Image (cartoon, rainbow, N blue to C red):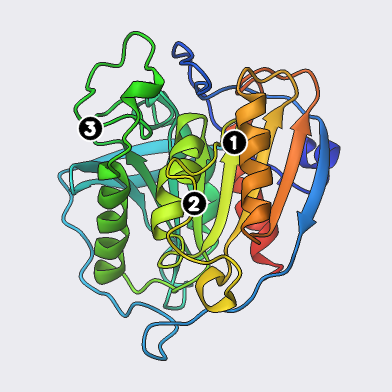
């Protein structure tokens, strides 16, 4: 696979895109470029598994409400559209016949406006890698069909959300936890590392809400494109200093040095390092918001860092 972005940036690669208006401190998904990087600090400790098992043991799959396809490099990949806890999922199973059970899980959370999901940009960029990499791929649409970081009742994708629109009660985090639990019941999924990816508002949601609440239950690689924030509660509901809770969790940020949310992203990096979570970052020179290939970057980051665990 040709990766000019990886060649330029060396250690981290992440990707996503969207043309939606930019809310304060929460940029929309973006486009493509390259920049400078800094490596990961800290190590990764093995965490507990489920009663001694290394995978979920699930079976049966989810029924499809619909189907679709994406084409990449002249190959067509089919996806199943399913719904769990008010979340629409586009699911691409790994290639049949050569994949040993269990499989990994990679789940991508779009930015504001959800165009990476609704226009199939995320599955087109990320599912082909998952298909040949023993990984169940899922693109997840926010319950309000607009943004993961805003409350479910905010169902308009127009206008500019504000800080008061944040899902501070954690309804979306609870929904994503139910999605993961359901997927684990329906497929035999490796306990960890799980692969999380986000762009803009998806990254804000992961760092501000989901990870602080559920990080000790769902451990793994977080590929955070053009976004990030501190925990909205001001803390984690688990202890990053305890290896049995932290497990394989590590965070990778990629962002532009002209991002309007630069202060928020850098504060997020500092906060998670303070929680003893291994963190890496890549800075894209001259990029504003998601003005680089963040969807491909997420995919490449998943691939690159799986080999180090």
Residue that numbered label 3 is attached to: 152
Q: Earlier in the sequence, mark 1 or mark 3?
A: 3
Residue placed most toward the observer, 299 or 212? 212
Q: Position of residue 224 (x, y in %)?
A: 58, 41
Q: Residue furthest top?
A: 159
Residue placed most toward the observer, 299 or 247? 247
Residue 201 visible in the picture: yes
Residue that numbered label 2 is attached to: 235
Q: Are marks 1 and 2 in contact (CB under 8 Å)?
A: no
Residue that numbered label 1 is attached to: 225
Seen in the picture, residue 216 relative to 168 is either above or below; the reply is below
Does dot 3 land on a helix, a strand or a loop? loop
Q: Nearer the viewer, mark 1 or mark 2?
A: 2
Seen in the picture, residue 48 relative to 298 is either above or below; the reply is below
Q: Nearer the viewer, mark 1 or mark 3?
A: 3
Does dot 1 land on a helix, a strand or a loop? strand
């Amino acid at each position: 696979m040709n990766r000019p972005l990886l060649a330029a940036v060396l250690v981290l690669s992440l990707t996503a895109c969207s043309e939606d208006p930019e809310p304060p401190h929460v940029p929309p998904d973006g486009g493509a470029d390259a920049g400078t990087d800094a490596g990961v600090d800290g190590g990764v400790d093995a965490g507990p598994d489920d009663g001694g098992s290394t995978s979920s043991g699930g079976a049966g799959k989810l029924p499809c409400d619909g189907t679709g396809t994406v084409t990449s490099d002249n190959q067509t990949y089919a996806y199943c559209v399913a719904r769990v806890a008010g979340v629409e999922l586009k699911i691409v199973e790994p290639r049949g016949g050569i994949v040993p059970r269990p499989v990994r899980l990679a789940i991508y959370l779009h930015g504001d406006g959800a165009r990476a999901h609704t226009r199939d940009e995320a599955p087109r960029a990320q599912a082909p890698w998952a298909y040949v990499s023993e990984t169940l791929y899922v693109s997840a649409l926010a319950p309000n069909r607009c943004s993961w970081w805003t409350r479910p009742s905010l169902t308009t994708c127009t206008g500019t959300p504000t800080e008061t629109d944040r899902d501070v009660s954690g309804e979306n985090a609870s929904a994503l936890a139910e999605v993961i639990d359901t997927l684990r019941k329906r497929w035999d999924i490796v306990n960890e590392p799980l692969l999380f990816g986000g762009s803009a508002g998806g990254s804000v949601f992961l760092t501000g809400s989901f990870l602080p609440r559920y990080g000790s239950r769902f451990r793994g690689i977080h590929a955070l494109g053009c976004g990030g924030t501190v925990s909205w509660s001001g803390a984690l509901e688990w202890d990053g200093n305890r290896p049995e809770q932290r497990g394989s969790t590590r965070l990778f940020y990629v962002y532009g040095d002209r991002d309007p949310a630069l202060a928020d992203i850098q504060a997020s990096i500092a906060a998670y390092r303070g929680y003893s979570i291994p963190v890496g970052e890549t800075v894209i020179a001259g990029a504003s918001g998601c003005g680089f290939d963040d969807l491909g970057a997420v995919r490449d980051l998943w691939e690159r860092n799986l080999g180090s665990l």
